Image (spheres, rainbow, N blue to C red):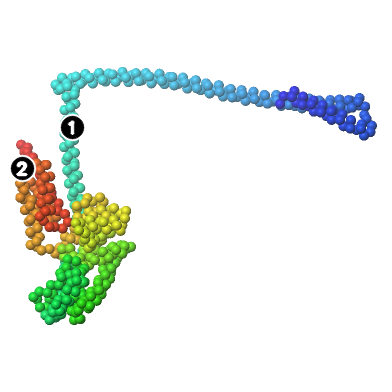
Amino acid sequence: MDPLTVILGLLLLVASAVAGYFFLQSKNTEGGTRLSELEAIEKASNLAKEKIIEAEKKASEIEKDAQNASENLRKQLAEQEKVVTEREKKLIDRSKNLDERFDSLESKEKEIQDRKEEIKKIQDELGTKLEEIAKLSKEEAEKELKKKVEKELQDWTASKIRESEKQIQESAEEKAQKIVMEAMQQSAVDYVADTTTTTIDIQDESMKSRIIGKSGRNVRAFERITGVDVIIDESPTEITISCFDPIRREVAAIAMNKLVSTGKINPAAIEETIDKVKKDILKEIKKTGEDMAYEAGINDLPDEVIMMLGRFKYRFSYGQNLVKHTLEVVKLGEYIAKEIGADPEISKLACLLHDLGKVMPQEGKQHHHISAEIARKYFKDNERLANAIEAHHFDIDSKFIEAEVVRIADAISGARPGARKDSYEDYVKRIRALEDIANKHEGVKEAYAIRAGREVRVIVKPESVDDNGTKVMAHDIAKEIEESQSYPGVIKVNVIREVRATEEAK
């Protein structure tokens, strides 16, 4: 703080004190004795002198402090100036070093450039000499070299690809055979193909008349309620029940056996017996569905799906009961899925549901498409499951590995010896018909029906049929098979045209 400002402040303070003093004295005179003006002035002067002396003392102290602070500031500035000077000196030395390095680099760069030009000159001279010796220009020599290298690389690549393909194929086949064999061992069961029986044994021929009833009323009532045909032929101790629906046929067979055993046959007894048998059959269907789900290790299936599975007990495919076939496919699928890294739960469920369409038929639709629709209805947002079911007969592309698992498991179960029953004569006729359809086309060299008639392999003469012709021929053969043959699933037609080039190294 400025000393002069301090002194002026003290003077103002003194003047205020004097004015206050006079004010007090004037108050005192009103109450009594008044002091003389001279005494008051003298006292005020003494007081002012004391204040001035005190102010001078403080001003001196303030001035001293200011001088000390100024001295310290000068010392600090001197030290900072010294540091800045040293830094400036270092920067100058560093700049000098950088200039020297830059000059050195510039000199080396110039030297390198000179050597590059010298090397380029030598390369040009060598190129000219090589062109003179080889009698080829640079571009022509480069082209020939590239061509030779590409040819060698192509041959080497093709050789390596063939070796790799062979190794992969050998290892893949070995691994696949091992997985399939182990899967078949895990689920192998001994059974003979089941067949439905629609023949009812009766005690004697007199029972036939009781079954027919007066004017045929009993047999008409039985056929009307059950929806089957009762065939009473010349055999004295047998009657036959005919119906395309296996459940209706089963209900009719059980009811007829009960009626024959009791001997009480009339329209009322027939209706009562059939109603009771239907209820028993529904219970058996539900129990069969629950047992299948339990044995497959799958819980929380909708009741509708359980009832569909239970109908498998009365459904056969080529003589193979669907319950046994389905559970075998489930075991195969689960094992294969674990071995190849597929989802075992989705694979098991797809194997369990893959033939639902066989017990819930719809006009104009194949059973695997119906099964996929059922899966989409009851297991929403699970396209992996639906595709695995829908693609197991190869007419739909498999999008997920689980679809391949279902395909393999279904094929193994159906192809096992004794699993399915088919007429040998019918089988030979069907296979021969497929081969005859292919052989009658012009340009066909050989034709084979393989995979139990699921594929027709046609080999054509390459000089008679071109590549476009093979596509047309495959379409024509497939179209003719669709129009003339009756078969389950899908038949694949493969037309093969092979051209072989043979040379001898002498």
For disc 1, the neighbor class at 10 Å (few under 14, some 14 to 19, many from 20) is: few
Q: Quadrant of residue 334?
A: bottom left
**Residue 253, percent across and down?**
18, 73
**Residue 274, percent across and down?**
23, 74
In this view, the residue in front, 481 or 125, is: 481
Please determine whether, in this image, residue 483 is positioned above or below residue 16. Answer: below
Task: Pick out the residue farthest to the front.
Answer: 215
In this view, the residue in front, 283 or 131, is: 283
* Image point (24%, 19%), residue name: 122
Name the kind of residue labelled 2 in the image. Answer: Ser
Name the kind of residue labelled 1 in the image. Answer: Val
Q: Nearer the viewer, mark 2 or mark 1?
A: 2
Please determine whether, in this image, residue 142 is positioned above or below residue 256. Answer: above
Q: Quick check: can you spot residue 69?
A: yes
Q: Quadrant of residue 503?
A: top left
In this view, the residue in front, 228 or 128, is: 228
**Residue 34, percent across and down?**
93, 30
CB contact under 8 Å: marks 2 and 1? no
* Image point (22%, 78%), residue name: 269
Task: Pick out the residue farthest to the right.
Answer: 33
Tag shown at residue 97:
none
Q: Tag 1, which secondary structure?
A: helix
Tag shown at residue 464:
2
- Sequence-first tag of 2 and 1: 1
Image side of residue 430 versus residue 170, left or right: left
The quarter of the rendered structure image containing the C terminus is: top left
Q: Quick check: can you spot residue 250?
A: no
Image side of residue 491 versus residue 76, left or right: left
Which residue is identified by label 1? 149
Q: Tag 2, which secondary structure?
A: loop
* Image point (25%, 74%), residue name: 275
